[in-house]
Structures are given as C-alpha cells and as structure tokens.
Amino acid sequence: MRRADRLFLLIHALRGRRRAITAQQLAQTLEVSLRTVYRDVADLQRSGVPIEGEAGVGYVLRKGADIPPLMFSPDELEALVVGSRFVRAFGGERLGRGATAALLKIEAVLPPELRERAARTRIFAPALDNRLEASGVIDALYAAVQQRRVLRLTYRDGEARASEREVEPLCLSFWGGSWTLGAWCRLRADFRSFRPDRIAAQAATGETFAADEQRGLDAYLRSVGSSLSDHL
C-alpha cells in the first residue's frame, strides 16, 4: 500500500469516533506494523493534523476538527463528481481509474447531506467501448508525453494520405469531440497538431528528448495562440 493511501485510511479510521482507538487496532485495520502506525501518526501530527493521544493509550481526532482539503461546498463537490465522470469517459483508462478511486475516497468521508447531493447530480458522461479513449491510444500517447519519448508515427491526413514521421510529443488537448497531440515534428521541423484517430501506427524509437525553449511546450502553446494557452 502506498504511504499516501495509508495515511488517508488512517485519518478515515479516526474520523467520527468518540473514543480513542488503539495503535494495535489501527495496525490490524491497516494491516501494518505497530511501528508503522506510530511513525505515521507522528508524521500527521507534525504536519498539523489534529490527532490527540499517545502510544499505549490510543488516538482520536480532536472534536470539531476537519481536514481542510475535504471541506467542499455543494457546488465544488458537484464539480468534482461531474469532472470525474468526464475523466472516466474521455481521459483514458489510467486516469479514469484514478478519477474513480479519488471520488470514492472523497465520498467516504463526506457528511451524509453532501454525499446525497453528490448522488443527485444529473450530468452524465457515458463511457462507450467503441470510443478512442477505450482503445488505449490516449494512455499510450500520454505516457510518451510524460516520459519525453520520441515516437515514430504513421499518420493519415484529412485526405487519407499517409506519411511517416518522428515527433517529440508535448501535450494532449481535448476539444469536446476530438483529441489532438501537440508535438514537434522532425519531418516538417515545426510544431504540428495530430489527431490520434488518424494515427495508423505508433512506436517508440527508444530515444528521449530534452526540454528545449525553441521547441518545447511553452513554444508550442505560443504557436497555437490563445485557443489553447488561455485555458491552461
């Protein structure tokens, strides 16, 4: 279990309790050692989480205390719910799983009235199996963006003419009905925006590229103008 997940679950185990819970009980709940519980509690206390108690006695979250990142207004909560639905539908498989897990964690610690508000949200984004996002293409392109991997593309333009080119992928943009991959095209020696649904084949060359002021992300955003950069 990742440390961040473990700390979240530890706080969740303390929330809403009137009586202290012992370190042994926390260790059993989290399936970790007593030493890990003591260390995690101490780290949380140092970071400002209002946990009271001590080893051998037990721990409790101070009455009336709340964790600031989980204090949402109804509109903020609804935005998170709707946003997670859109990410699940359009953000690719990896980010979709992340959105689902994040929302479950948030809902687990919400008061009943806000949890009910989240359930009443009436904006949906159905995820269809035949969408580009379900094919793994977006995940693969985004991984290349993050890892700065040079890609070799077989690309078809609007008239179905194919070309082979190597690109340095810089970002992905979603335009409501379609995606574009912003990249430095080595064939054209210029920035280009590629539609993933027109990429017939892609493969990593094994080469990575370094950040560059002349052909990096900032320069790409300047080249496309306000249509994209104003929304970042």
Image (cartoon, grey):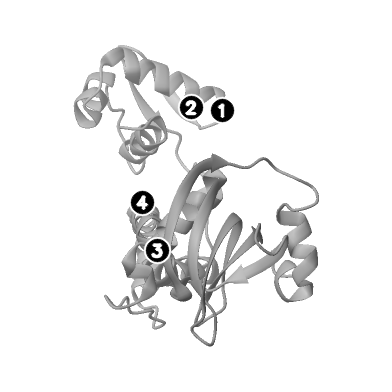
Q: Label 4 sits on what residue type? A: Lys
Residue 57 pos. (x, y %): 31, 16
Horizontal and vertical percent position of residue 10? 35, 33
Query: What residue is at 33 percent from the left and 73 percent from the top?
Result: 119
SS type, badge 4: helix
| Residue corresponding to mark 3 | 137
Q: Nearer the viewer, mark 2 or mark 3?
A: 3
Cα–Cα gap, marks 3 and 4: 28 Å
Q: Earlier in the sequence, mark 3 or mark 4?
A: 4
Q: Report the front residue among 57 and 137.
A: 137
Marks 2 & 4, CB-CB < 8 Å contact: no
Q: Quadrant of residue 32?
A: top left
Task: Bin the neighbour count of mark 4 within 10 Å (Cα to Cα): few under 14, some 14-19, many 20 and up.
Answer: some
Q: Amino acid at mark 3?
A: Val
Residue 47 bears which disc, if any? Answer: 1
Mark 2 closeness class: few <14, some 14–19, many ≥20 residues within 10 Å: some
Q: Is residue 178 above or below residue 47?
A: below
Secondary structure type for disc 1: loop
The structure residue drawn at horizontal position 37% and vertical position 37%, both measured from the top left corner, is 5
Whether the residues at callouts 1 and 2 have beta carbons within 8 Å, the answer is yes
- Read off the residue under disc 4: 105
Vertical order, 18 against 197 (above or below): above
* Dot 1 or dot 3, earlier in sequence: 1
Comparing 187 with 112, the one in front is 187
